[in-house]
Amino acid sequence: MDRRQFAGALALATAAGALARPAAAQDKKFTVALIPGLTTDAFYITMHKGAQAAADALGVELLFQGAPEFNPTLQVPVLQAMIARQPDALLIAPTDKQQLIAPLRQAHDAGIKVITVDTFIDDGKYQDGSGEGDFPLSYVASDNVMGGRMAARALAQAIGEKGKVYVSNVKPGISTTDQREQGFKEGMAEFANIEVLETQFNDNDANKASSQLQAVFARNQDLAGVFGANLFSAFGAADGVKAAGKTGEIKVVAFDTPTRIIDDLKGGAVDFAIAQHPAEIGFYGVVTAFAALTDQSVPTSIGTGFTVMDRDNIEKPEIQRFVYSD
Ligand code: T6T
């Protein structure tokens, strides 16, 4: 059992223990806030559902508020408004590793227990006594470096381990998508006949990602594949391949699995889709907050799972349950 699996197992045990509420917590109804990266993203909608399930089980009041775009300039005022409501704990997907450190410190200084979900601040190593962004209690998320490596293996397989590929990514400075790109490049380094072209940054805009795919294809008629490193990048990759008239020829690996990506998987524009388990992230985020609020010690890192979807397994119920809620 590695450290993250151990942390996950510990969280499960904590969840089970916490459900029998300690005497000190009987009278207090805790308020936990969840601030997503943005509100209109199936990934965070699904995370919210998981968080609500845990909140209902534990008798916690859950507040949910976010910005319409994945953007620190829009997220910080939402955070400040949430701090003013004085929740007991705050779960947040910070939209930038550096820019959210100071605003989140205000929450911490106000006595709110801070836990980051999906993304991290600073180096993501919390409570180790080093770094400006050391104060959150825990980080609940996918292992995004591993996710990037999984994407590399899937894309290498889809293109017969040779040819040109690139990463369609959001923008530098986001922990999750930075780590996926890192893992993808590390994974692709094992394939001598695969060339990874320059990353294209799309600002979480699927239309921009689609135009970029067509431009990369115009310059590289032998383009073999693309890794869409999050939901909007993957939408754009699939749309771009269709617009270029290359469905099924330029291979696409999508990170994130909203229903539209599943339609593209079935239709041939996407070859593999890597589902995160956002409901798990939300659930264990609330459980971790509850544990901290009832004086339990909490793991500083909790790793959640992945499910790889392809045309062969997509109809199976055990796979379907990880398609995101829209
Ligand atoms: O991929 C997810 C999330 O993990 C990432 O941090 C930002 O993009 C998504 O929300 C998908 O749009």
Image: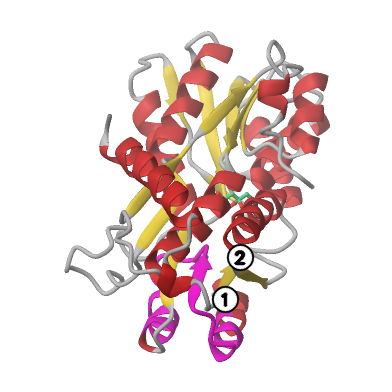
Q: Residue furthest left?
A: 129
Amino acid type, residue under disc 2 in the picture: Gly
Amino acid type, residue under disc 1 in the picture: Lys
**Is residue 276 placed above or below 95 in the rendered structure?**
above
Pointer 1 with pointer 2, Cβ within 8 A: yes
Examine the structure image and report whether residue 91 is included in the region drawn in magenta.
yes
Q: Which mark is residue 29?
A: 1
Badge 2 density bin: few <14, some 14–19, many ≥20, Cα 10 Å: some
Image x and y of residue 212, in percent: 67, 44
In the picture of the structure, the residue carrying the numbered disc 2 is: 59
Judged left or right of residue 174, residue 79 is right
Image x and y of residue 116, in percent: 45, 62
Q: Which residues are magenta?
A: 79-108
User: In this orientation, does residue 118 appear?
Assistant: no
Q: Secondary structure at mark 2?
A: loop
Residue at (37% x, 39% y) in the render: 9
